[in-house]
Amino acid sequence: MITKDNLEEYFHLWNGKYKRLTRKFESDLPRFSSHTEARAWFKELFGDDFMISDTDTIDGEKMWFYTLLVNRPEWEKGMSGLKTQGYSSGIDFLMSSHSIEIFDSGRIHVVY
């Protein structure tokens, strides 16, 4: 069971530098019955580092796209570059977050 106390067990360093969720995280997620239930669980676990970014409907089911920050300083630096220069270069910004998709049914997909 994933908790705040054991959350670090679900991360690894990719390329020795970048904090990334493991596939075990996705496989150990609780089974949710709705988007609302799943969102509440993620917000409880990650707080302000779990942010909505968009919604869409795919095959008739509504889906919410979230950004999970794993390196807030690099993410903020990259977002600042996007706003001021129109682009952000380098892998640090790309690796500073995970995309997480939550379907209306509660199904989760973590984008690696």
Image (tube, helix red, strand yellow):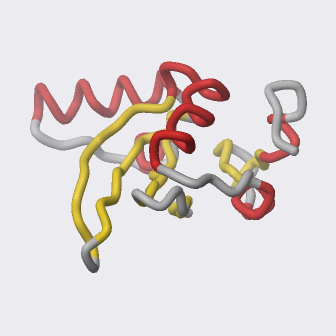
- Quadrant where the C terminus sits is bottom right
Q: How many marks?
A: 0
Counting from the top left corner in percent of width and height, residue 6 is at 89, 33
Along the line of sight, which residue is nearer the eye, 43 or 25? Answer: 43
Q: Is residue 15 visible?
A: no
Q: Residue at x 87, y 42 (%)?
A: 9
Counting from the top left corner in percent of width and height, residue 99 is at 45, 52
Q: Quadrant of residue 93?
A: top left
- Where 71 sits versus 22, above or below? above
Along the line of sight, which residue is nearer the eye, 65 or 35? Answer: 35
Q: Residue at x 43, y 60 (%)?
A: 103
Counting from the top left corner in percent of width and height, residue 94 is at 42, 49
Along the line of sight, which residue is nearer the eye, 4 or 103? Answer: 103
Q: Residue at x 11, y 33 (%)?
A: 85
- Where 76 sits versus 62, above or below? above
Relative horizontal placement of residue 66, taking residue 1 as reference (left or right): left
Q: Quadrant of residue 18?
A: top right
Q: Is residue 19 visible?
A: yes
Counting from the top left corner in percent of width and height, residue 5 is at 88, 25
Q: Outermost residue toward the front?
A: 33
Q: Residue at x 27, y 79 (%)?
A: 59
- Where 7 sits versus 35, above or below? above
- Quadrant where the N terminus sits is top right
Relative horizontal placement of residue 90, taking residue 112 as reference (left or right): left
